[in-house]
Image (cartoon, grey):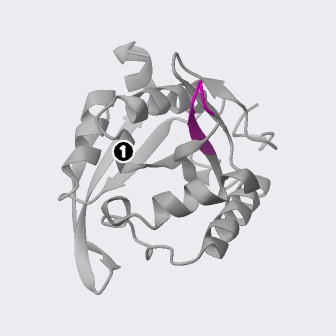
Amino acid sequence: MSLANNSITEVPVLTTENLILRAIDEKDLAGLFAIFSSEPVMKFMDVERFTNISEAAQMVTFFREKLSIGEGIRWAICLKDNDQLIGTCGFHHISPTHYKCEIGYDLLPAFWGKGIMTNALHAILQFGFEQMNFNRIEAIVDPVNTRSYALLDRLGFQREGLHRQSFFEKGRFVDVYIYSMLQGDYKNELHF
């Protein structure tokens, strides 16, 4: 598998000590709806909260389409003892030309503060750098979203700067922090 020849045609299963990361499918509609209709989760997202489960079905289709054209890959985050989706994570805005992508993630609030997302992102970062051959993985974070940028700091991402009024979301302009991890950072950190 590599980014250069776009040979990833299905979402591989990744495992950690307590998690299984797998493809998102129709059995995950209720979980996706729970996440994307949650006010605490959606507070910092650039899309509106879901109001109908059909929006979750559209999201499954969207993730499949992005995978099929090589622009994204998204995993369901499940506890090992339960195949129920509790969050998602993955890469989007994949650029094979520039060997980079953007990372995204979300988790049901009941599972916040338990190290779940840290473990999940460790797994996909390893996959991204070692299997997809990314040189750069970026993250875009609302400066008010302290939990998200604390996670990135723990993982070894570097804050590169602030883009002022970079996005128009929910009726207002918002600033964003830009974070990145380079393949050299990943190899040098040896925290994976």
Q: Which residue is mark 1?
A: 110
* Element type at mark 1: helix
Picture layout, residue 17 above or below residue 79: above
Picture layout, residue 39 above or below residue 169: above
Report whether 34 appears left or right of 157: right
Q: Give the residue type at disc 1.
A: Ala
Picture layout, residue 25 above or below residue 153: below
The quadrant of the image that shows the N terminus is: top right
Report whether 94 appears left or right of 192: right
Magenta-drawn segment: 75-82
Of residues 22 and 134, the one drawn nearer to the viewer in this rendering:
22
Find residue 151 and report its horizontal and vertical position in percent: 29, 37
Give the residue at x 72% y 40%. 4
**Outermost residue, top direction?**
190
The quadrant of the image that shows the C terminus is: top left
Give the residue at x 23% y 55%. 145
Which is the main secondary structure of the residues drawn in magenta? strand
Q: Is residue 50 visible?
A: yes
Q: Is residue 99 visible?
A: no
Report whether 55 appears left or right of 67: left
Q: Residues within 10 Å of mark 1 (few under 14, many from 20)?
A: few
Residue 151 in the magenta stretch? The answer is: no
Find residue 96 and report its horizontal and vertical position in percent: 65, 47
Find residue 48 and report its horizontal and vertical position in percent: 43, 77
